[in-house]
Amino acid sequence: MDYDSWNRVLTEHFFPLREAAAPVYLSVDDALLTELLTSHTQAATTPPTAAENFQTAIRSRVFGRDPFEGIASRARRWRRHGAAGNPPFIALLAATVLAASRMSRSDRFSYYGPLRELLGLHEGSGMPDGYDVIVPTLWDHLKWWLTEHEQGRRGLPSAIPHPTQVNIGWSLSQAVLVGSDRVQVGLFLSAIGAQPGDSVPEAELLARFQEWVRLNRSSPRIQRALASPELRPILASILQQELTHYDGLPRNSAGLPCVPLSLTTEAGGFPYGVAARIPSHLRLESLSLNGDVIRVPSGVEWLPLTPPDQELTPGSALELAADTATLMLPARDLYVLQANDLVGKWTSVNAAEIGVPHRVLVRTAFAAQAEAVMLACGSDGVRQPRRVQVPPGWTLFSGYTPTRSATVSGVVGPLAPLHQQLARLSGGLRIDGGKQTYLLGYAPDLVLPAIPDDHPRTVTIDGVPLPPVSQVPTDTITIRLAERVHSVGEHQIEVGHRKLTFTLVERYRESVALPLLALPPRSAKLATIPSRIPNSASPSALASWLPPGHLSGSFFGSYRLDPLPPTRILRLGGSIYALGGNRLAAQLVPEAPGWIATMDHVPHAIDIEPLLAALPFQAVWLLQVTSSQNARAWLAPIVQTGSYSPCDAPSGSWTILSQADWRRLTSRSITTAVACAQDWTDYTAGK
Amino acid sequence: MVHDELLLWCSERGAGSLDAFQDTYTWLGKGKQESSTLDWRIALYNLQILSHVEVDWEARIWGVTPPVLTTLPNSGGHALLVGQRPLWLIQRLERLHEDPDPGIAALAQSVVALPPHRQADGPSVRMVTLADPEECRALCEALGIAFEDRAADQLVPRLPRFQEMLTERGVQRGPGGIEPQKMSEGGGDLWTDVEGHGEPPLHGAYRYQRYNTHRYIYWIGMSGFIADKRTVVYAELARAERWVLRYSPLQRELYAPKRMQLPHLHARAAVLRSGLLPQLTALDPQAAPDRHSMPEYKSYVKYVNIDEAFARQLAESLYQKLQLVP
């Protein structure tokens, strides 16, 4: 391929149109060149062949006393004419990155040597003429093209200057991490609980990343970068940059989201499987794996997957490429397993949780160390299940339930709760799932995980610093913000340079919350398994959204049974009498039902039907006398007398009165409703 | 207190995952002197039978139910507030007489909110007193909540039979799982190990070990009906004609063995007669009174304010012959 072909292929590879505006790294190495040339020529290519082809193409444009001027001139013209087409300098920048990648592979920190070798500039040594002016300018052109001309549609610039190696830093920053390394950074940020918008000091990020790499056995490139004093500052800047643009999803160099995989197992032993944890904010409708299309149900959180043909064993990494995402299972020497109700199996997690039972699968070489840590984290003695078959060289523990955290590093680190976690908000009465909104009086706790001694804690709440906490810095500290924050509104917590915000509201709802679930009818009965309710009504609508036949979360549908027998309530006051035919009378002495007396000590009314049903005669009228001047009568409800057994009678009693009492009662001034006044007159007259 | 705060959170939040519920319940329990050892699942189950939430245990989500005032029979003019209790509603109910709506303020003359009555393992019972159910209905309409007359009595004729409950989930064909146990016919342990692999054909109630819980299946030959524990238990009781439900006409109380409590919808119907969760009790009248308070003697739970017709209808839906006790 000639220069323009390489330029086009590289531009299309690194800067296609994307959904998410994430930093893009022009990470070129010999492996990538081989891949691109093979793909372009449709013929198998070896790395030396690809390198030579690329080298030849670059040298066709970079030569002479001012080797970079030709491309610089084209760049100026391209930009002056509206930046139509591909930037003409991508291949040259890629060459500078390739030189940096070759430098970082060697033990010597020498850049210009490999660069000159690549460009064929064998005359002279050190920095080639014009490099210090033109190459940084070209990086600036790239930045302008990505941010202003393309508005982030093709990614965001990522080149970072080195604090001391000013000229070469740009290219060096692209060579520190490549391809799948980018995913490792995203997985690391996810593992420590980073949130979009978080800010963490570079030094702390780097220290945490170093610890994380030790557990997850990352690429040799990352390990070399961590071990190199020259590359560590660049790596720290890259981590900071990645955190700045972190949207909650690890992504690869092409911007595809990376879905973390977890190891799954029935009891800790064979067979092992994998399950993908689908982030709630990732819209994934399907996954195409090995030619199979797997539909992802809406709202699903866990998706069990069939691993590829080879038998999956602990300790091995797995990367599956689907069209719209990559799925990754890091290789580990220790797996912390939790019971997962959604998957129906024990599933590996990032770190143990306090109070939760775990199983632990660890390489036998670290088993004793693991057992010591589990003890240090306050668990009861763990066991080794005998009937579970684990791979040779591995040990399984069950019954690990930590009760506290501890500062632990190395392979056994994940056994400590909140291992590697950033300070975060936890608990509280959170009422908006998407935002940090809580009810007043129920603010969340601030959890400060155990950290190394050289990262002192300073905590401020709304700008007011908290008194230093005098305790062992290796302990986890929980600060109950509910005891310190008492006002409605937004509040800001600063832990060192990390900022966390949350909002308190006095109340969240001003109307009835629409129901999500209800028990549907099954002909005349009810189902016991709820269904989701499709709510299309406006949230501001009142009870009209309740379908007819709704009761306490259950729907009866349109089927209606016979109505309930009527009941009447009589407010207590004065004396109450039942008057029957033939001048029969009884004084009713109601009592509040015993079961409710404990809840309402002052009875105010009675259910009248049960009391009337217990009478030995049919009451025709009820008479309530509240004073010598006030008496009221009304028609008594018709009841079936004697329908209550003596044992079944409601609270209350009656006293049969004489006919003389009946005359006395009915001869006073009594108020009745107009509609039954004549009936009362007839009754008292004996009709 | 914890349970009241939990219901407040459910009411303001509206719906959520079981994980979120567990996290919130755990957090609320921290640092409380009355810290409860009640498992979060039971706390949620109690909210479910009190009719405050509906729960889909398989999908692991919960949703708060609409607020309803429902009259309580044989209560002397009380209505129970079930469903969600958002702050706006509770504050308004507690200040009805000061309500800016003059119609509501007038209704406050006859519908009065009572102080909450605390109960163990569940949110407080919230009731209003009323002299005329129609006034209560009018108040509910004005507040934008529902009113139901005697919800429990409306619910009981709609209770599904255990046969219907068994067929709601799928039918298991083939082995049910690992470590099978069969429901015993009596004795100390409800579930006993079985010989063999527990593979069909089988008859009766079985449970199988899953990774962290149990699975319950009622077998009829080669067909296994997957259901919740209580449904499977009552199916077995019906098959063996073991009558475990007791009723006291004098006390107007229904009793179920502590180990064989009612399926949740049946429990809800019984609970809605009083608003009170089932309470541990002893049934042995021969036991000395001082022994009645000892936990080991409280082998039953009781539901209060249950009349005999209601108890019989409920028992019949579970194919139980009600046994009368003093």
Image (cartoon, coloured by chain):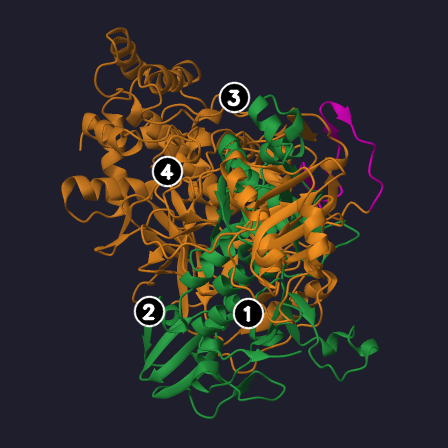
In front here: A551 or B63? A551
Dot 1: chain letter:
B
The residue identified by callout 3 is A166
Task: From the image, state the color of chain A.
Answer: orange
Q: Position of residue A543 (x, y in %)?
A: 43, 35
Q: CA distance from mark 4 to mark 3?
A: 25 Å
| Marks 1, 4 in one chain | no
Q: Say if the magenta span includes residue A243.
A: no
In front here: A603 or A339? A603
Observer-side mark, 4 or 3, equals 4
Three-letter amino acid code at the position of disc 4: Ser
| Marks 4, 3 in one chain | yes
In front here: A365 or A286? A286
Residue sticking out furthest to the left: A42
Q: Say if the magenta span includes residue A463.
A: yes
The residue identified by callout 4 is A253
Circle 3 — which element? Answer: loop
Q: CA distance from mark 3 to mark 1?
A: 90 Å
Crowding around mark 3 (Cα neighbors within 10 Å: few <14, some 14 to 19, many 20+) is few
The answer to whether B103 is drawn above or below residue A642 in the figure is above
Which labelled disc corresponds to residue A604? none
Q: Which residues are magenta?
A: A442-471
Task: From the image, state the color of chain B.
Answer: green
Circle 2 — which element? Answer: loop
Three-letter amino acid code at the position of disc 3: Val
The residue identified by callout 1 is B308
Circle 4 — which element? Answer: loop
